[in-house]
Structure formats: C-alpha cells, structure tokens
Image: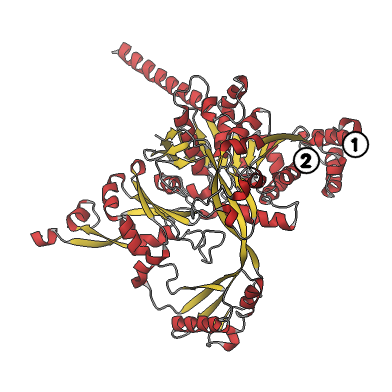
C-alpha cells in the first residue's frame, strides 16, 4: 500500500516534471510577435503598451491599407520628404526607442509607405538622439514599380486591371504610384544580417510576420548557407527537418493575418461589443507562433477586450476572398480547415492551415489621378425630417444642374442610408437626418461650386437645416488600379540597405539634428539617466564629432 | 403541433444564426458570417446563397456575388464584387470601405423550417 502510494506520488511528480519540461521546450521554440498597429491612424501609443507589458521577440506594425498608399503618395507629391507613416515617429519619440532598445525586440514595419528612405532616416535620427549608436536599420526597397511600366511593360499596354479588365495604357492620366506587394524573404534576410529595425514600403501585411519567422526559425540563415538568392521562393529556404514548408508558411501567414489589424482580433469591432469588457483599454494582440506553424493568439494581461473563438473567427475571415486560395506573395493559403480552440482565458489556438505554392506574379497596387472630389454634410431637424432633407438635397442639385460632369452621391443618415434595398422595410421616420454629400468631377471648378453650394442651404432651403462648416476644398482623387506583374521583373529591384548611426553624414543631417546634439549632451553630461543611455550618448557624441570616424 | 405547422417556416433575424465582420479589397466587399455553433454551418449554407444576397443588396452590388464555405470555423464568406462605387479611394459613400455591411446584414431575416429552428434551440416548441 505504502509502495503504491509512493509510486503514485513519484508518477505524478514525474508527470509534472515532464509537463514542465515540454512547457519549457515550447517556450523556447515559440516566437512571440506583437501586432501594435492596424492602420495609419490607429491608437498611436499601442506599440508602447505592448513593449512595456510583454516580452516580445518581434513587434510588427502594419500602417498600410489600400487607401493609405494613395494618401501617402499624395503627400509625397506635395513634399518629397513625406509619404511615410508619421505615427511611427510619434510613439518612438515618446520613449519608444528606449523601450525598444531595452526590450531587445526587433521592430518590423511597413511605415515606409511611399518613401521608406526618409522614414528610415528619421528613425535613425531618433535612435541617435537617445544614444543607441549601434542601432542597425534595414531599409527594404524595390516595391515601387512605376519605372517598370514604361521599360518592361510597354507603357502599360501589357497590364490589365484585375477587377475591370481596363488596360493601364488606356488611362487618361498617368500612373502616380505602383507598388508591388513584396513578400517575407527580404525581411527575413534583413533580420539575419543583424537589423534591429526593418522599414519597408509596400509589403503584404502577413509577410511582416512571416519575415520574422524566417529569421526566428533559421530559414533565413539556411537560405544564406545554401546560397539561395533573395528571390528564391521561400518554401525552398526551409531547414531540412521541416516536412511541409508550404503548410508552415501558410500557418505563419494566418498567425500574421490575425494580428496585422491590431485590436480587431482582441474584441475591437466585434459583433459581441456588448459583452466585451473595457474597450477603452483594449489590448493589442500577440501571436505565440510555433516552428510548425500553429499559434496561440493572446493579449497582454490586464488589458481590456477579449480574445476568444468568436473574436478570432471574425478576424480570420476579414478581407479574405476564396478561403481555399488566399494569395500572398509567400504562399497560397487554404484556411478552409483552420480551427480555433480556446485553451485558456484570452488564449485561442489556431491550427490546421494548409499551403500551396506561391503564384508566379506579384500583385501591384497602382493609383492614377482621376479628377477631383469633396465631401460635406448638414443636419436637418423638425417635423417630416426625411422629406425636408430630400427637399434640401433637391435644391442643391437644381442649383448645380448645369454642371454636367459633376457627380453627387447623397446619403440620408438616420433615414436608413446604410440599409440595402432588401432591408428598406426597416426604415423608420427619424426626428433628424444627417445629409452627407460626396461629389466628384473631372473639372476642379465644379467641386469648388459644389463646396460653395452647401452653406447657403441653411438660409435658402427649408427651415431646420444647420451644421455650417468651412467650404470643403477640392481634393485630388486617386483611383486604385490593381494588376499583376511577373515576379522576375520585380525581384531584381529588391534591395536591403543596412544603415546605422555611423553612416549619418553631415550633409544628410536634417535641421533636427542640432537639437539632437543638445539633447545628447544633456544626456551624456548630467541628469541621472539610465546608464546605457549615458554611455551611448557619450559614444555617439564622440563619433559624430570626429570626421575620420564617419564613412 | 400539427403536420401543417411542421412544414411551415419561421422568419428569424440572421443575427440569431451568425455573427460577422466585413472589409474591402479594391471595389469588392467581403462579409464573413460565422455560425454561432460550428455544426450549424449546413443551415447557414442553406440560407446564405448568392441569390439571397443579390436580392438583399439589389443594385448596390454591380458585379458577381460569390459565397464560399469555411468548415473549420463553421462560416461562409460572401464576396460582393463592385459594391463600393469604384473602391475605397474613390467611393463617394461615407462608408467607403464597406465596414458596415457585416453588421447591417445581421438585421436581415432568413426563413428556417420550424422543425429545424426548434432543433437548433432558436425557438420554443
């Protein structure tokens, strides 16, 4: 009896030991990646929260939606130093650089947008400012294919819009931007060459995460030792023990897809919003990814929101087409049999994703100028609010009826503007209506006229109309033109440039750097700062003041 | 319950069957609809068809409508092509990126055989 009991205890102890061992092994082989931004305009300081509350191996920030690239392109047209996601600098300046340095996490972001070089330069200055002198920033370029359209694609006559079939060469106005969605390969290689921060232009969202995994799991190192070019399909980079590299890549892609929209997987934008606790302090997601591809989606302890099967399922299908063939530059993902299992509080295990070989093409997101537009709105109240708002709209349209190129879209919010025809029966008579107009024309003067016609409605239309704001200014409209381009045309352009503070030349210094030196001196000479900051501040001052040390 | 009643259908809001989210890709909108229970997928598949969606959205959707099944999570993915007046960058809609579709559609009603609705626990016998 005693022996049995002893045996029993022994067994349970060894079981515990075994479980702990496997947990340790799992923790060692598992890569923790945080997703700190879902788009440019997301909560600016979310990356700070992630870095200060969680131990991360990598922090990825996706700042680029389809719309964002065209906004950034417009900014670059106005000022050649702009065109990148400035939110990056806002949180880095607010202590983010120091946190990033201290945490040891690598930062991978597509904040470069339409101008990765200037973005990287600014980040480098920030690192320099806090004395992080050995900070290495990798800049990935080659996504901009505008030049290729003339050179290799016969001015666009070989290019068709994948949605409309229209030929690129048939456009009235030329292409403003054309950016290929690059894959994970260059990111993996940039990290392998020692980058602390990787800044890219247009890279497929999930590839930001896949790139981290290529580095973390030794695929990038393997590709170098095997002598693979950076353009080799990355499933051939797999280390020898990996049985089905395509499945692994597809699973990593899903692990990335789930966190690249930030808090949308943690209870933000959830159908269950009534049940989600503390959205004010919603947590940003972390993917704990295994070498084999399965992952756990979670969020930092103590944050608001929720991670459960329902919040993850909604994000799994977000912006997906055919679930059997979700195309990324790295792999074609089949997520039909991906499963979600709740394994603990705010922990969901994701597995079962399959992969197929990547296609021969990169998708290109191009934009071209297509006239002018402006938006405006007014609020209408009182009896028969809907009838009044329609009368108000009629008055405006009558006054602008001679402008034949002007197109106006009127929406009556409160009166069922969001309801499709099949739900028209749900419309109710509201006590007020918000009229919202969107107008466009190939003629800029038409949009100026539209802008002038809004405010007068308050005094010259039906009673009960209000909400005057400044006349909307005409804005250039950039139309999206997606097309496919053979990989072998894009790949030779891809470049990884490693920058570090030593490469800052005098001529490259922006006026900002004057204050940078002041700041460095104050850090180096005094106030009780963190030790590493003082040490590095001195180092960077010494180096930057000695021309012989510069390249 | 009479035989007659058993053959009848009951009209229920889609929100009783599924939850969802929508997003854009170019000029198309996708709506992921996930059944509240994974094994309700066949029911969801029987009601969410391209015809049903075409009827619901009418002229708002200019292109083809596709519905794909995602058995792993018990969901269907609806793709509405040509639903954004040209896409997010040029749409004159306030909701230029189709973010509202996923919640708007949950208000739509679907017809389920009474027996089936009882079996799923959606209505009392």
Instruction: Measure the C-alpha gap from mark 1 to mark 2.
Output: 16 Å
Mark 2 nearby-residue class (10 Å; few <14, some 14–19, many ≥20): many
Q: Is the residue A539 above or below the residue A308 in the image?
A: above
What chain is tagged by disc 1?
A
The reply to whether residue A523 is in sight is yes
Q: Please give the residue where the numbered disc 1 appears in the rendered image.
A: A545
Residue A74 picture quarter: bottom right
Q: Nearer the viewer, mark 1 or mark 2?
A: 1
Residue B54 picture quarter: bottom left
Q: x%, y% of residue A326?
A: 45, 42
**Camera-side residue: A320 or A98?**
A320
Q: Is the residue A160 above or below the residue A417 in the image?
A: above
Give the side of residue A503 with respect to residue B34, left or right.
right
What chain is tagged by disc 2?
A
Quadrant in the picture for the N terminus of chain A = top left
Q: Is the residue A260 above or below the residue A186 in the image?
A: below
- Helix, strand or loop at label 2? It is loop
Q: x%, y% of residue A48?
A: 64, 45
Q: Please give the residue where the numbered disc 2 appears in the rendered image.
A: A130
Q: Residue furthest left?
A: B2
Q: Is the residue A251 above or below the residue B46 in the image?
A: above
Q: x%, y% of residue A447?
A: 63, 73
Q: Residue furthest top?
A: A3
């Amino acid at each position: 009896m005693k022996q049995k009991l002893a045996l029993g205890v022994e067994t349970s102890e060894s079981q515990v030991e075994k479980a702990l061992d496997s947990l340790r092994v799992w923790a060692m082989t598992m890569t923790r990646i945080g997703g700190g931004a879902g788009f440019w305009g997301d909560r600016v300081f979310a990356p700070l929260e992630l870095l200060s509350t969680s131990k991360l191996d990598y922090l990825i920030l996706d700042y680029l939606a389809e719309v964002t690239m065209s906004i950034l392109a417009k900014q670059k047209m106005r000022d050649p130093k702009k065109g990148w996601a400035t939110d990056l600098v806002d949180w880095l300046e607010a202590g983010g650089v120091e946190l990033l340095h201290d945490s040891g996490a690598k930062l991978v972001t597509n904040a470069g947008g339409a101008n990765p070089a200037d973005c990287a330069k600014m980040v480098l200055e920030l690192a320099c400012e806090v004395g992080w002198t050995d900070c290495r920033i990798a800049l990935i370029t080659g996504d901009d294919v505008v030049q290729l359209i003339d050179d290799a694609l016969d001015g666009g006559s070989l290019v068709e819009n994948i949605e409309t079939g229209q030929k690129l060469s048939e456009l009235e106005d030329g292409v403003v931007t054309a950016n290929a969605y690059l894959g994970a390969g260059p990111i993996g290689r940039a990290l392998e060459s020692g980058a602390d921060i990787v800044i890219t232009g247009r890279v497929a969202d999930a590839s930001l995460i896949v790139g981290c995994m290529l580095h973390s799991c030794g695929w990038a190192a393997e590709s170098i030792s095997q002598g693979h070019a950076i353009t080799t399909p990355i499933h051939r980079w797999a280390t020898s023990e990996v049985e089905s590299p395509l499945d692994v890549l597809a699973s990593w892609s899903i692990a990335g897809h789930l966190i690249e929209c930030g808090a949308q997987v943690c209870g933000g934008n959830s159908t269950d919003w009534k049940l989600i606790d503390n959205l004010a302090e919603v947590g940003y997601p972390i993917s704990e990814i295994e070498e084999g591809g399965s992952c756990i989606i979670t969020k930092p302890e103590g944050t608001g929101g929720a991670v459960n099967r329902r919040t993850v399922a909604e994000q799994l299908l977000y912006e997906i087409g055919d679930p059997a063939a979700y195309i990324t530059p790295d792999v074609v993902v089949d997520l039909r049999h991906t499963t979600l299992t709740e394994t603990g509080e705010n922990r969901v295990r994701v597995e079962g994703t399959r992969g197929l070989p990547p296609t021969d093409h990169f998708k290109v997101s191009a934009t071209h100028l297509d006239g002018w537009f402006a938006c405006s709105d007014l609020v209408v109240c009182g009896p028969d609010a809907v009838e009044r708002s329609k009368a108000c709209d009629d008055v405006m349209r009558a006054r602008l009826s001679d402008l034949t190129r002007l197109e106006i879209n009127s929406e009556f919010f409160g009166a069922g503007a969001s309801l499709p025809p099949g739900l028209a029966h749900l419309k109710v008579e509201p006590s007020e209506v918000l009229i919202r107009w969107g107008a466009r024309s190939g003629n800029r003067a038409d949009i100026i006229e539209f802008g002038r016609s809004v405010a007068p409605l308050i005094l010259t239309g039906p009673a009960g109309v209000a909400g005057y704001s400044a006349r909307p200014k005409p804005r250039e409209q950039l139309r999206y033109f997606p097309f496919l381009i053979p990989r072998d045309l894009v790949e030779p352009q891809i470049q990884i440039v490693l920058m570090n503070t030593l490469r800052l030349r005098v001529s490259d210094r922006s006026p900002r750097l004057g204050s940078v030196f002041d700041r460095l001196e104050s850090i180096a000479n005094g106030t009780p700062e963190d030790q590493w900051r003082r040490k590095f501040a001195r180092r960077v001052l010494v180096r930057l003041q000695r021309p012989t040390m510069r390249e | 319950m009479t035989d007659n009643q058993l053959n009848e259908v009951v009209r229920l809001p889609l929100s009783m069957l599924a939850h969802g989210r929508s997003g854009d890709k170019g000029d198309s909108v996708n709506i992921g609809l996930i059944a509240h229970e994974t094994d309700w997928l066949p029911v969801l598949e029987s009601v969410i068809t391209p015809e049903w969606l075409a009827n619901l959205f009418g002229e708002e959707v200019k292109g083809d409508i596709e519905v794909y099944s995602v058995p792993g999570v018990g969901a269907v993915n609806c793709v509405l092509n040509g639903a954004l007046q040209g896409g997010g960058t040029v749409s004159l809609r306030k909701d230029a990126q189709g973010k509202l579709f996923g919640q708007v559609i949950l208000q739509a009603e679907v017809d389920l055989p009474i027996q089936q609705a009882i079996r799923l626990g959606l209505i009392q016998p």
